[in-house]
Image (spheres, rainbow, N blue to C red):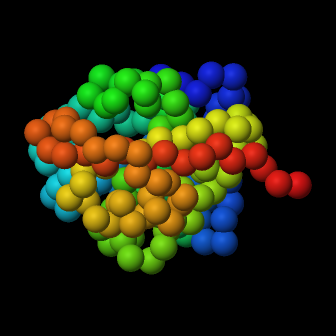
Amino acid sequence: MTDLGPVAWPPAPIRTDRLVLRAPEARDRAAFIELLASPEVGTYQGGPRPRDELEREMPAAPERPPGLFTVDLDGAAIGQVILRRAAGHHAPAASAGKAELGYQFLPQAWGFGYATEACTAALDWLAGELPGEPVVLFTQTANARSIRLAAKLGFIEAERFEAYGAEQWLGRRPPVTPSG
């Protein structure tokens, strides 16, 4: 993962009406294993990873890479949001080096607007840290829920391409500068 450059990490926790976006902590380990082992979450991400493999390999204290927010609801991790530089390995070259938004949420957290709330907060934080920074987002075209979320967040389809054995959707969000 490529970090965002001159951004201090981790920032102070970001609070929304219902959520806290914060750096990963040891108490999040079980939720992260559940997230990565979930067949529903893995549907558009190459499939779930075997739980026993995750139990063996995941450290007790999670890595805290720049741009990775744990999404916390009432003291429990329900997902993660990540902002990083798009690498362009399997994506169009025009997206390489741009800020990329990614997200994963536990299935029991789906349908309540948590992803919209968390991603909006992360994007607002990014706009404050790197004003005018354009952001891209990739998802499989078959992932209609993710494309709907992208549209709510202001992403516009830029192109489609083939990667990982499936058609991918690339959305771009125009640069946003903070108001105020």
Residue 103 or residue 177, whichever sits in front:
177
Q: Relative to 151, is 111 above or below?
A: below
Residue at image position (24%, 54%) is 141
Compared across the picture, whether 85 is left or right of 176 comes to left
Q: Is residue 82 visible?
A: no
Q: Relative to 4, is 164 above or below?
A: below
Looking at this view, name the residue that lies furthest to the right.
180
Residue at image position (35%, 60%) is 146
Across and down, in percent, residue 134 comes to 59, 39
Residue at image position (43%, 36%) is 62
Occupied quadrant, residue 12: top right
Residue 111 or residue 133, whichever sits in front:
133
- The number of numbered discs placed on residues in the rendered structure image is 0
Across and down, in percent, residue 179 comes to 82, 54
Q: Relative to 147, is 84 above or below?
A: above
Residue 110 or residue 173, whichever sits in front:
173
- For the N terminus, the image quarter is top left
Q: Relative to 38, is 87 above or below?
A: above
Residue at image position (68%, 28%) is 7
Across and down, in percent, residue 56 comes to 20, 34
Compared across the picture, whether 123 is left or right of 57 comes to right
- For the C terminus, the image quarter is bottom right
